[in-house]
Image (spheres, coloured by chain):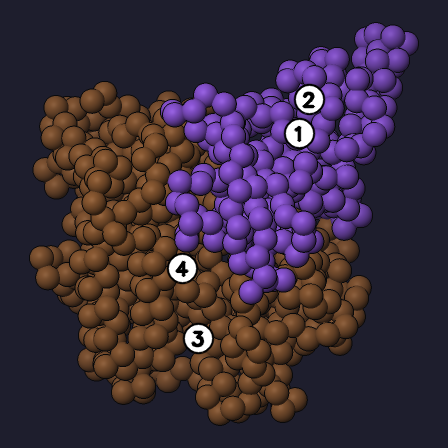
Amino acid sequence: MKTIDITVTRYDPENKPAPYDQTYTIPYDDEMVVLDGLNYIKDHVDGSLSYRWSCRMGVCGSCGMMVNGEPKLTCAVFLKDYPQGVRVGPLDHFPVVRDLVIEMDDFMDKLRAVKPWMIREQEKPVQEGEYLQSPEELQLFRQFSMCINCALCYAACPVYAADKTFIGPAAIALAHRYDMDSREEGQDQRAEVIGSHEGIWECSFVGECSVVCPKHVDPAAAIQRSKVQLTKDHILGLLWPWGKS
Amino acid sequence: MDALKCDLLIVGGGAAGLRAAVAAVDVQPDLDIVVVSKVYPMRSHTVSAEGGTAAVLREYDSHDLHCFDTIRGSDYLADQDAVELFVDTAPDEVLQLEHWGCPWSRDRDGRISVRAFGGMSVKRTVFASDKTGFHMLHSLFQHSLRYARIRRYDEWFVTSLLVDDGKCVGVTGLDLATGRIQPILAKSVMLCTGGGGRIFPFTTNGNIKTGDGMAMAYRAGAPLKDMEFVQYHPTGLPGTGILITEASRGEGGYLFNREGERFLERYIPGKMELGPRDILSRAIISERQAGRAFEDRHGEYVHLDLTHLGEKVINEKLPFVRELASKYVGIDPVYKPIPVRPVVHYMMGGVSTANDGSTPMEGLYAAGEVACVTINGANRLGSNSLTECLVFGGFAGEAAARHAVSSELVDPSRIQEAALREEQRIEQGFLHREDGTERISGLRGEMQAAMERGCGVFRTRESLLETTRELAALRERFADVRIDDRGKVFNTDLVAALELDFMLDVARCIAGAALTREESRGAQARVDFPERDDERFLHHQMSLISEEGPRLETQPVTITRWAPEERKY
């Protein structure tokens, strides 16, 4: 069987103050993903290696890590594509809890901050049936509803790297998902959250977030569209201060 | 040892747990509710459900038809009062989730779409493309964020139930980030921890599905019901076990053997690919045994052919199937058939509950896959389980909230000793012990192999006895387990050991109940007892803890309007 070197950036806050590298040489085949490699290490070589994973089918969002310097879902990239060896580290721009486990608190707070729930002035009773929505209306936000909260986009984002108060790509995409939903009336409330911070204006068109997104959510598009909307609201507010649109 | 406190403690943040939390806050807005989960809620395994969620929403459909399909699918072991309640409540739950934002797929006229599913007589399965579970879970999770009264302890691993005077009064939890073990006291405790597919070597289930809630309830003295019934889904990818949704057959996919036959003609000509899962999984194994399956290094398989559906339908209705097959087996289903084989998917059995989610132990509730009400009996129909999470999650949340309002928190001094004992069990038994030679992965692999060999799709008395012996030996060897990781912070090695500990108990219950049920019904196929035997076995089997392992009792099946008859399709 072929072998491959997997170099893991490890961190053990109880015993060593600084992160360090450890290289494991393991057997592999063409069907193994990077996560399978980590599982091989954990099961057969070193049970102390810590990382998160569950579904191993690209939908639970747990196993995001830096793979040769790029944020990846480790269940979705194959060892065979790294014949020279692979380096695995915790996602950039997050505090590290242990080994490959990052602290998610800030990310979770940001998701909540954009009020990712249906906001309507009046709720009709369930007994009156569904809110009708055409396939075309669904299509307007569907893409933005596909985010698995893997946080790869934060690890890729130059603005978040410099300023941790930036609300960030996934949260803005989530806000946009609700804003674009034909059943929704909470756009103003979310605009307040997103427009209240400078971060969104610092975001260039580079779109690193969309490049690394494993689910093609395209948060960069959500950010640019939000900017346009915020600008429009601002100008309308200047022209008609008594009420927008 | 300081204790954390709340009114209602929900263990597990998947569809059932989150639905329960929202239901509880809706009926009791002042309640202090905590959802504790070993993962962030959006990682829960609900996320992997693909095909859909069943409810009677169309004029051509009826309450009685959904009931009958479910009961016939269960091979008459479902409790019919529970099924009627389930079918009655399902439409409102699906609509409620729509109101909370779930992006259900739509028809041209804007109504929620429905699709065909195995064992369902008409199209009644609501879906969100082929990521139904993902969208349901994220919609529920995001909706739950609006409630300040729903607090969360994310990444806490619950290790045991605390029982005082026969009542469940809290749990002990391991905070993964710090390694601290702490009691969490509550007036009501609800288990929503899902099933335990990881007991088997080849499963659609994620790594977190380790039967934790079932084992904790069993250890605390609550009965587990109908544990022998383990569902094999007919279509998993060879090698990984990744699920290829039943919706691929609902949308018109065919199953072929090596000789190019749609072999289901031999087994279930009336339903073909839309037959229930137990029958289809057995059919595939039978084709294997007859030498008509394909074979490669991952073993024997058959073909699921979607090529005739065309790229447009596949992209619109089954995009995730296309993504998964392309990525993990290198097959684009637009052009080539997908290799598939039966794979462990779901546990019909679980913690025995009444229709309101209450268990025989006061203060303890359960809902979702961990629970057994039972609407699923001996075989669950695809797309009933997501709805079950909503319906019974909701009922259980309300009942547990009411119980909490009328109860007092236990005096912390009364559980002090039990909590200390648990801390010692974990620290002395795993974390600080110096000896020990058995690797977790070794024992786990042997357990999984023993279950597949003796307690899989086809079972015999001999195979089950052998598996039971192997499990007993593994339990002894587990006492000698060694973990590599001695740290406090995010010790996943310790978690894996505790999960294996749980799985060994649940495995024992599955094999034990399969042995005493000397008949074939639904997912239980006994080669030595090939017929269903209503005279001896039209009852539930309850597994109760004892010194010698699980002790079995029986409980009658509730029959309301559908007298058991031969299960014909």
The crowding category of the residue bearing disc 1, from other C-alpha atoms within 10 Å (few below 14, some 14 to 19, many at least 20), is many
The crowding category of the residue bearing disc 4, from other C-alpha atoms within 10 Å (few below 14, some 14 to 19, many at least 20), is many
**Separation (CA) of disc 3 from disc 2:** 50 Å
**Chain containing mark 2:** A
The crowding category of the residue bearing disc 3, from other C-alpha atoms within 10 Å (few below 14, some 14 to 19, many at least 20), is many
The crowding category of the residue bearing disc 2, from other C-alpha atoms within 10 Å (few below 14, some 14 to 19, many at least 20), is many
According to the picture, the residue beneath numbered tag 3 turns out to be B278
> Residue B223's image quarter?
bottom left
Left or right: residue B114 versus residue B545 is right
According to the picture, the residue beneath numbered tag 4 turns out to be B197
Callout in the foreground (1, 3): 1
**Separation (CA) of disc 4 from disc 1:** 33 Å
**Chain containing mark 1:** A
Q: Position of residue B209 (x, y in %)?
A: 41, 52
Residue type at mark 2 is Tyr
Residue drawn at point x = 18 percent, y = 46 percent: B220
Tell which of B500 and B506 is nearer to you. B500
Q: Position of residue A237 (x, y in %)?
A: 84, 11
The chain shown in purple is which? A
According to the picture, the residue beneath numbered tag 1 turns out to be A154
Q: Are marks 2 and 4 in contact (CB under 8 Å)?
A: no
**Separation (CA) of disc 4 from disc 3:** 16 Å
Q: Are marks 1 and 3 in contact (CB under 8 Å)?
A: no
Residue type at mark 3 is Asp
* First along the sequence among labels 1 and 2: 1
> Residue B273's image quarter?
bottom right
Tell which of B359 and B565 is nearer to you. B359
Left or right: residue B26 versus residue A239 is left
Residue type at mark 4 is Gly
Q: Which color is chain B depicted in?
A: brown
